[in-house]
Image (cartoon, rainbow, N blue to C red):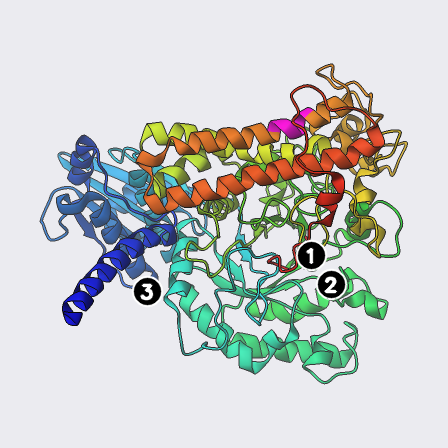
Amino acid sequence: MKSIFFRKWYFWMCVLSTYFSLYAQKDYKLWLQYTPITNPETVANYWENVQNVISTENSETLNIARSELKEGLKSMLGDHFDISKKADNIIVLGSFKSLNEKMKNQLKYDFDKIKKDGFIIKTLIEKDLKTTVITAKNDIGVLYGVFNFLRLIQTNKSIEKLNIIDSPKTDIRILNHWDNLDGTVERGYAGSSIWNWQKLPEFIDQRYIDYARANASIGINGTVLNNVNANALILTPHYIEKVAALADTFRSYGIKVYLTARFSAPIEIGGLKTADPSNPEVIKWWKEKANELYKAIPDFGGFVVKANSEGQPGPQNYGKNHVDGANMLADVLAPHGGIVMWRAFVYSEHDANDRAKQAYSEFVPYDGKFKENVLVQVKNGPIDFQPREPFHPMFGAMTKTPLMIEFQITQEYLGFSTHLVFLPKLYEEVLQSDTFSEGKGATVAKIVSGKINDHVLSGMAGVANIGSDLNWCGHPFAQANWYGFGRLAWNPDLSADSIANEWLRMTFSNEENFVKPIQKLMLQSRETVVNYMTPLGLHHIMATNHHYGPGPWVSNLSRPEWNPTYYHKADANGIGFDRSDTGSRATAQYFPEIAKQFNDIKKCPETYLLWFHHLPWDYELKNGKTLWNGLALQYQQGVNEVHDMQATWNRMQAYVDETRFKEVQMLLKIQYEEAKWWRDACLLYFQQFSKKTLPDGVEKAAHNLNYYQSLQFPFAPGI
Ligand code: BDP
């Protein structure tokens, strides 16, 4: 009796766990679902094209490319795809030199156009014989070509007659993991770090391989394994062998490993008394460290450095400057081909002036002084990864220095991994901003890709949102931000629209009834979060430390620029930070065309109004409403939009697996409640100064201000 019961129980447990793992795997598989193509006509067409894959060469990367192609096709085309069948229609895969002479002649012209890591996907037709060639200058280019080809099928595009010639527009397409050696992730909201330092180097988690594959599928070619607030221990032999094991795992996916370097490491792990960059002992220590690193990891990428920023050590501790620090490290890496990414995220605790101006003031005078293998890494905006910021004025201002852009993929200031926010919309807004540094058309995208001033190095960094969560990113839609970052790093001119479209098709479904409304929802989601958090140019009004939820009242932190009151400056007269000519003159850091616009209240885009101006509560907005009413209505609009997102998602059950459908549904419910929390807390607080009633259409707060001010989040993640 007992055993029958047990057998039944066991049977159902197996069924259930298979069921759950099947669905759980969907979350884990990211955008590489390779769901079977359902449209029979399309299948027939694809089938005709892909009955055989020919590749003569061997290398680890090409083997990966070949099996990715075969597995992808098999999964999407099912029984129709039979690799063993002899057929007329074939795919040829391989480096250019492996192609036959005839193909080489046919592709020669295209081949000259691609750059390193670029690829060609071309259909060659001769009589009835159709050949699809995927070729490149190097093996990794072939792998990128394969992922591109599979994406076409995944997104229901025709592969009948292909003529794709594509190359990445930036060289360094890199994730920055703010992962600590103890397994926590600074500003991480998807579990703990995926690097298992304790089990490395012997144990290679399958996740590392899946991580590398996912990154390669979107063209990411670098990873910084550890936090910018660095621990010097990562540079000890104990960790270097672990880092080397990861580098070995990632190599065939075209991914180089980089580390953050703590500037005081020569003291902490080297036993020296100083880390002064001009001290010969210090230089010798770094040289030897570089030799040691390159011995273990011959293609080690280089260092990211956060120096003299938020308490991190740096050259200024020794009376030296950023150039001295960066160039010293650049010199030790140069013989090995390594680079330095020196961060420009600095603001001074002794400078009472506008924080938004400080990075520019500190770095621009150094233009032209950095060594060739140094890139200066600049955040997208002048403050700190806010829901909306104008582009950083350093873009365009340092013509002799390659500037990398740094975006945050993890949502530190945008609702963690709880809120659905499609960040490529934010990235696109910044990348397409015109700096006017070389007349019209000098967009941030062009500067970052090195096009404007012809830099050899170029790059884009994204602070990763990846963790040990089953679905990697904590929210099914947060995966789209990792994906979108990679796609934009490859081509900063891609549109957020097209990225959302392809991601949805690859991750969920090709059903138009699903793709259309959800694409719209994604594209709107960034504006929505701005509406309910920081409308009209407000910024940095998040709660202390964890930055989750509203805290516009915070004014007691030791440094003025850590306090939200410093940023919104609300008082009886009005609200906003005057950065115009009558205020901090931060507008003057932009090129004249832009400066004029931001400076003039009438011309300043209302999206940046309170970023640049302090205005009376009765100030009349473009829509004729007073500033107070406009602000209140915009908060309300944010709330309404989340409500609409919920309604839209609820209609999608038929197109989404149950697990992900429910996950998103639950998360949107929290987002809705929290949008109301933002609206109520901010409006109650600002109302103390405006002394005005809420306009019609704005719901009354559920609690009083004291309640919102009393909320505590003791173990909020990511700190
Ligand atoms: C801020 C984060 C902090 C980071 C810092 C940085 O709050 O955790 O260390 O940026 O980028 O946004 O260095």
Q: Quadrant of the N terminus?
A: bottom left
| The image quadrant in which ligand 1 is located | bottom right
What's the amino acid at mark 3? Glu
**Mark on residue 167?**
none
Q: Check if residue 118 falls in the magenta segment.
A: no
Q: Residues within 10 Å of mark 1 (few under 14, many from 20)?
A: many
Kind of element beneath mark 3: helix
Q: Is residue 364 above or below residue 194?
A: above
| Residue 213 pos. (x, y %) | 38, 57
Quickly name the residue at label 3. 60
Q: Identify which residue is drawn at 73% across, 73% down.
A: 264
Q: Nearer the viewer, mark 3 or mark 2?
A: 2
Kind of element beneath mark 2: loop
On the picture, is 437 further left or further right than 294?
right
What's the amino acid at mark 1? Arg
> Tag 2 or tag 1, which sits nearer the N-term?
2
> Label 1 to label 3, Cα distance in Å?
34 Å
Quickly name the residue at label 1. 343
> Label 1 to label 2, Cα distance in Å?
7 Å
**Which of 298/530 is in front?**
530
Kind of element beneath mark 1: strand
Q: Identify which residue is drawn at 11% across, 53% down.
A: 84
Q: Quadrant of the C terminus?
A: bottom right
What's the amino acid at mark 2? Ala
The answer to whether the beta carbon of the residue marked 1 is less than 8 Å from any atom of ligand 1 is yes
**Which of 72/384 is in front?**
384
Q: Is residue 550 above or below residue 284?
A: above
Q: Check if residue 636 falls in the magenta segment.
A: yes
Quickly name the residue at label 2. 307
